[in-house]
Image (cartoon, helix red, strand yellow):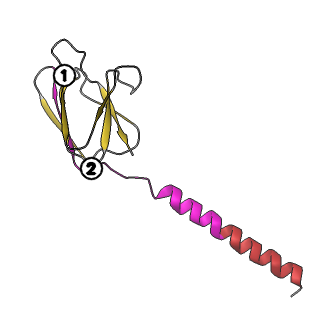
Amino acid sequence: MPVIAHRRRRLGIAAGTVLLTLTVAGCSGLGRTAVGPIAYTTERDVEITVNSPPVKGCHRLAPSGAKVVSNGTLVDIILYRTRNCTGPGTTYLAKSFTDVNAASALPWRSYSTVH
């Protein structure tokens, strides 16, 4: 086998290995969850618990919003007053903490995880 063909073959194997590694690393984050519950009380005094929500994306709370949120997960979350995790007036809620809204404050309507 000529030297040039041997080098091309080694380069091809190395490139394939790198691509395979990147593919596996990119897929390893799929399905990751914030282990533990996020519990909240709605404006209508209904208690809701979400167990181990995914760490990616925006998560909506009940349509009426939440006035109390307890983060029992292993990650921190950010609470939003909008349904799409945007806008001002956010609150950072660390793991194992609870946030209680003032009576005059708007309810929380969505959250995202910090990971």
The answer to which of 103 and 29 lies nearer the viewer is 103
Q: Residue at x 74, y 71 (%)?
A: 12
Q: Which class describes the residues within 10 Å of circle 2: few (<14), some (14-19), or many (20+)?
A: some
Q: Is residue 41 above or below residue 4?
A: above
96 relative to 11 in the view: left or right = left
Residue 36 forms part of the magenta stretch: yes
**Which secondary structure lies at badge 1?**
loop
Question: What residue is pinned by disc 2?
Answer: 74
Q: Kindly identify the residue that appears in the image at 39 percent across and 27 percent down.
A: 85
Quadrant hosting residue 43: top left
Frontmost residue, 105 versus 39: 105
* Magenta residue span: 17-43
Looking at the picture, tell me which residue is in the foreground, 5 or 88: 88
Kindly state the secondary structure of the residue where label 2 is placed. Answer: loop
Relative side of 12 to 96, left or right: right
Q: Residues within 10 Å of mark 1 (few under 14, many from 20)?
A: few
Q: Residue furthest top?
A: 104
What is the x, y in percent for residue 71? 22, 40
Q: Is residue 79 above or below residue 55?
A: above
Q: Amino acid at mark 1?
A: Asn
Whether residue 35 is situated above or below residue 81 in the rendered picture? below
Q: Position of residue 99 (x, y in %)?
A: 19, 30
Q: Position of residue 97 (x, y in %)?
A: 19, 39
Q: Earlier in the sequence, mark 1 or mark 2?
A: 2
What separation in Å lies between label 1 and label 2 (alpha carbons)?
A: 22 Å
The structure residue drawn at horizontal position 24% and vertical position 46%, both measured from the top left corner, is 73
Which quadrant of the rendered structure holds the N terminus?
bottom right
Q: What residue sits 22% from the left and 20% below the top?
A: 64
Measured as percent of width and height from the top left, residue 24 is found at 52, 62
Label for residue 101? Answer: 1
Would residue 83 appear left or right of 1 to someone viewing this image? left
The amino acid sitting under disc 2 is Leu
